[in-house]
Image (spheres, grey):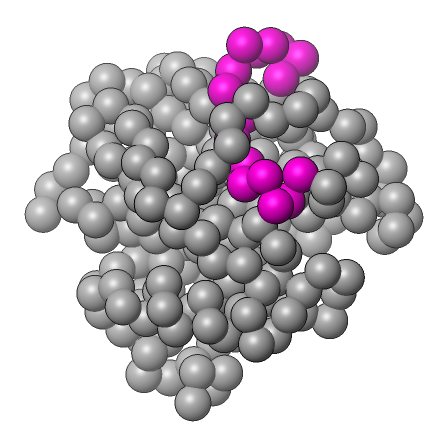
C-alpha cells in the first residue's frame, strides 16, 4: 500500500544511534523519533527536505537517544516532546550519560506522556504507541499499520535483542514485550531499530537466534 510516509535515517552520536526523521510528504510535516545526537545535523536534514518539525517522540530515555533534545528544544521551545512516564527518572538523570562518562546537555521536561494504545497523528498517518518495557522500564515503540512500519528503539534488532545487562533492565520483561507486542504484527512489517540496519518482523521471527 502506498502511504505518504517517508523515513530518513541518520546514525548519530558516540554509539551510532539511529535518529529517524519521519514525514508525511503530503503535508510536509515531520517528527523525529529519537533525537539521538547532533541537533544541527537533524535540523539541516529537515530544512533540506522542506519539512516542518512538529514533535519529538522518544522510544526511551537512554543518553544516546536523547542527546539532541536540548539543542532542538532551544531552537523550538514549544515543540511537543513525548516520552513514557516510566522513563522519566532515566530522562532526569540524562539517560545515564554521567554513569557512562559522556558529557551531555540536559533537555527540558517532556510535555507529552505516552501510554500503551495511544494514537499519534502525523498528517494522515496514525501511529499506535506500543508499550515494550525490558530494555528500560518505560520503553515504547511506534507502529503505523497502513504503512506497515515499526520504530522499535532498542527492543529488537536484526539478529539481536536489546541489552538487559544495565540498570533498570530485565531480559524476561523484554522477551515478554517482544512476544506480546512485536511478534503479533504482520511478517511484512518493517522494523526500524535504534541501532543498525532495518529488518522485518518476518525475518526476525524466522532467523533471530534470541527468539528460538
Ligand atoms: Zn537504549
Ligand atoms: Zn541505544
Measuring from the top left, give residue 25's x and y in whole percent.
Answer: 24, 25
Residue at 46%, 72% (x, y): give it: 176
Q: How many marks?
A: 0
Measuring from the top left, give residue 27's x and y in whole percent.
Answer: 23, 18
**Which one is in front, 138 or 81?**
138
**Which one is in front, 47 or 85?**
85
156 on left or right of 127: right
Residue at 51%, 62% (x, y): give it: 155
43 on left or right of 101: left
State the residue lying farthest toward the left. Answer: 1
State the residue lying farthest toward the bottom. Answer: 212
Magenta range: 73-88
Residue 86 in magenta stretch: yes
Measuring from the top left, give residue 191's x and y in whole percent.
Answer: 37, 58
Residue 139 in magenta stretch: no
Question: In terms of image quadrants, where is residue 53?
Answer: top left
Question: In terms of image quadrants, where is residue 181?
Answer: bottom left
Question: In this picture, is 68 found above or below 135?
Answer: above
Measuring from the top left, give residue 166's x and y in whole percent.
Answer: 75, 65
Question: In this picture, is 163 found above or below 110?
Answer: below
**Which one is in front, 146 or 26?**
146
48 on left or right of 196: left
Question: In this picture, is 44 found above or below 85?
Answer: above
Question: In this picture, is 67 found above or below 180?
Answer: above
Quarter of the picture holding the C terminus: bottom left
Amino acid at each position: 500500500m502506498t502511504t505518504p510516509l517517508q523515513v530518513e535515517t541518520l546514525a548519530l552520536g558516540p554509539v551510532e544511534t539511529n535518529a529517524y526523521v519521519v514525514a508525511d510528504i503530503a503535508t510536509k510535516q515531520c517528527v523525529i523519533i529519537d533525537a539521538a545526537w547532533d541537533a544541527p545535523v537533524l535540523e539541516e536534514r529537515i530544512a533540506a527536505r522542506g519539512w516542518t518539525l512538529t514533535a519529538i517522540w522518544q522510544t526511551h530515555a537512554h543518553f544516546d537517544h536523547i542527546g539532541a533534545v536540548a539543542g532542538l528544544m532551544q531552537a523550538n521551545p514549544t515543540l511537543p516532546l513525548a516520552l513514557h512516564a516510566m522513563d522519566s527518572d532515566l530522562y532526569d538523570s540524562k539517560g545515564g550519560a554521567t554513569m557512562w562518562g559522556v558529557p551531555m546537555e540536559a533537555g527540558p521536561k517532556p510535555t507529552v506522556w505516552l501510554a500503551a494504545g495511544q494514537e499519534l497523528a502525523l498528517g494522515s498517518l496514525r501511529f499506535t504507541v506500543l508499550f515494550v518495557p525490558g530494555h528500560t522500564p518505560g520503553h515504547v515503540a511506534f507502529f503505523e499499520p497502513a504503512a506497515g512500519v515499526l520504530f522499535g528503539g532498542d527492543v529488537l534488532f536484526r539478529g539481536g535483542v536489546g541489552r538487559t545487562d544495565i540498570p533498570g533492565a530485565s531480559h524476561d520483561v523484554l522477551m515478554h514485550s517482544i512476544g506480546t507486542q512485536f511478534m503479533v504484527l504482520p511478517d511484512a512489517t518493517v522494523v526500524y531499530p535504534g541501532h543498525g540496519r532495518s529488518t522485518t518482523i518476518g525475518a526476525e521471527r524466522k532467523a533471530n537466534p534470541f527468539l528460538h
